[in-house]
Image: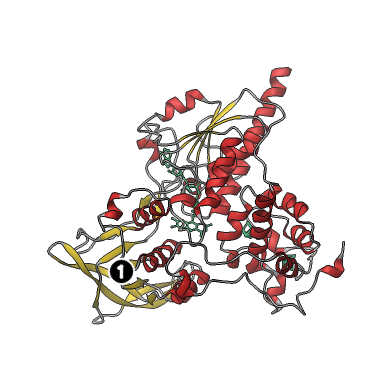
Amino acid sequence: MAKERMLKFVALGREMPVKRPAEDRAHDFHEIYAEYAAAKAEEQASRCSQCGVPYCQSHCPLQNNIPDWLRLTAQGRLQEAYEVSQATNTFPEICGRICPQDRLCEGNCVIEQSGHGTVTIGSVEKYITDTAWEKGWVKPAAPAVERSESVGIIGAGPGGLAAADMLRRAGVQVTVYDRYDRAGGLMTYGIPGFKLEKDIVMRRNQQLEAGGVTFRTNCDVGVNISFAEIRAAHDAVIIATGVYKSRDLGGPGSGAQGIERAIDYLTASNRKSFGDAVEDFDSGRLNAEGKRVVVIGGGDTAMDCVRTAIRQGATSVKCLYRRDRANMPGSQREVQNAEEEGVVFEWLSAPKGFTDKGGKVSGVMVQKMRLGKPDATGRQAPEVIEGADYVEEADLVIKALGFEPEDLPALWDEPALTVTRWGTVRAEFTSGKTDLPGVYAVGDIVRGASLVVWAIRDGRDCAAAILREMAGDAVLAAE
Ligand code: FAD
Ligand code: SF4
Ligand code: SF4
């Protein structure tokens, strides 16, 4: 190993790719970080100390071989770095952009713990695969042998697509069904372009298609085709439908016009970025332009909503969250980006109801909170401060309170599909096997709202399990 090229963290500081200034980026939906130049990527990769026990790797849901691809990058051996990186990750350039690295790989980098600033793992991963795309190293599936078995995948998000890619590369016939008109799931219609530009997702969709994956879009399972029909058409079925039922808010005035669900708001905005005609946006309903916007929630979806509203030209954007900054579920990096762009956070503030003028929302009735004693989980529960209520004026209120699974057994008329008490599909974690023979499930519909990287992990694990089963069947048939 060319050690002399590594271990540079003492002399070399951590440097992220250049971030566009807030006043520039707040007007468009382009990504906010530039790409590393080659020399900078090599330099930053060379900061890695090549740990014998790499905690970065064990805290990456895909167990990516991070030290190896950092070393290869530092040595300028980019194609090999790409080969190592893509061996464990179906979409490395996407994870490099949107994984919460501070909680996963980078948050566990040992040089961070010795006070030198973590290796910029995500940015190097993105650089490697963006370069691989540029150079034409990223190839569609070209299986050596076509297999007769077919797998139907319901849901074209990262979970379904990761499984599709792996199965197709092994020669399996794969059909992906999705109720939307474009594949990609929340990568396409949930996550805004300033975190993940849409052409990055579309080129993956096109490549899957070029590799022989059949997409049946605009196909809502349970409406346009039954679950039973899909089971009958394929040797195995993977459920990868994600979670889309928005948690709601009651209280006085909660039915007023101008109180919207985050998923509708973000989907409309993403559709506009594709150039689609979106009636509810064009009518102004889901457009924040010229409005005082209040977003309720403290997770990453809320962060995406506030930053979208800024870009649409809202006159003010406030985020209400019932706990404080230290106890919010969203990434601190995203809060900082939002604050730089002009978002104001009202911590320890919970909605109690809404005021309206002629049926249109005019404000959020806010209760001020304090954090009480820690509960059994150690988390401090918010308590109301009596007499401190006020009204936060608003023309558009966006509810970003999290997502729950839809009732699949009822929607699909399949009571034997077992779900947990949270409504998620019950499935074995290592294979995705459900209680129905030949039916698997992956991603958010199993885990509840989670992360792209976990959906990819599930999709890959599930595809591997299906391939093992197929290999076992082939052995039995030969006996
Ligand atoms: P999804 O991506 O939800 O895809 C499911 C697909 O199934 C969809 O295309 C849907 O149309 C389809 N479908 C559902 N029901 C049916 C049906 N009946 N018939 C046909 N098709 C159906 N994660 C990160 O790692 N980083 C982030 O920065 C990040 N930001 C996020 C921002 C927002 C606003 C949201 C909502 C989520 C974010 N996440 C982020 C979470 C991440 O997007 C999800 O964890 C991930 O997409 C889950 O993948 P999935 O494949 O399980 O489901
Ligand atoms: Fe880090 Fe995510 Fe890449 Fe794993 S996939 S190395 S967690 S950025
Ligand atoms: Fe390199 Fe940090 Fe991983 Fe160690 S923990 S191998 S220093 S990236």
Task: Where is residue 158? Give x, y as percent.
Answer: 54, 47
Q: Quadrant of residue 474?
A: top right
Q: Residues within 10 Å of mark 1 (few under 14, many from 20)?
A: many
Is residue 284 or residue 255 the one in the foreground? 284
Residue 330, image x and y in percent?
47, 66
Way the structure is coloured: secondary structure
Q: Where the C terminus falls, by quadrant? A: top right
Rendered residue at 38%/56% (across/down):
269
The residue drawn where x is 12% and y is 64% is 358
The kind of residue on which mark 1 rests is Val
Rendering coords of residue 49 (x, y %): 78, 69
Outermost residue on the left side: it is 358
**Against 459, is 127 above or below?**
below
Residue 354 seen anywhere in this rendered image of the structure: yes
Q: Kindly identify which residue carries mark 1.
A: 293
Q: Is mark 1 within 8 Å of ligand 1?
A: no
User: Would residue 328 appear left or right of 255 to someone viewing this image?
Assistant: right
Name the residue at the bottom extreme: 387
Horizontal side of residue 67 vs 217, given as left or right: right
Q: Residue at x 66, y 24 (%)?
A: 473
Is the N terminus in the top left, top right, bottom left or bottom right quadrant?
bottom right
Nearest the viewer among 159 and 379 is 159
Tag 1, which secondary structure? strand
Q: Position of residue 132 (x, y in %)?
A: 69, 51
- Residue 431 visible in image: no
Above or below, 370 against 40 in this view is: below
Image quarter for residue 110?
A: bottom right
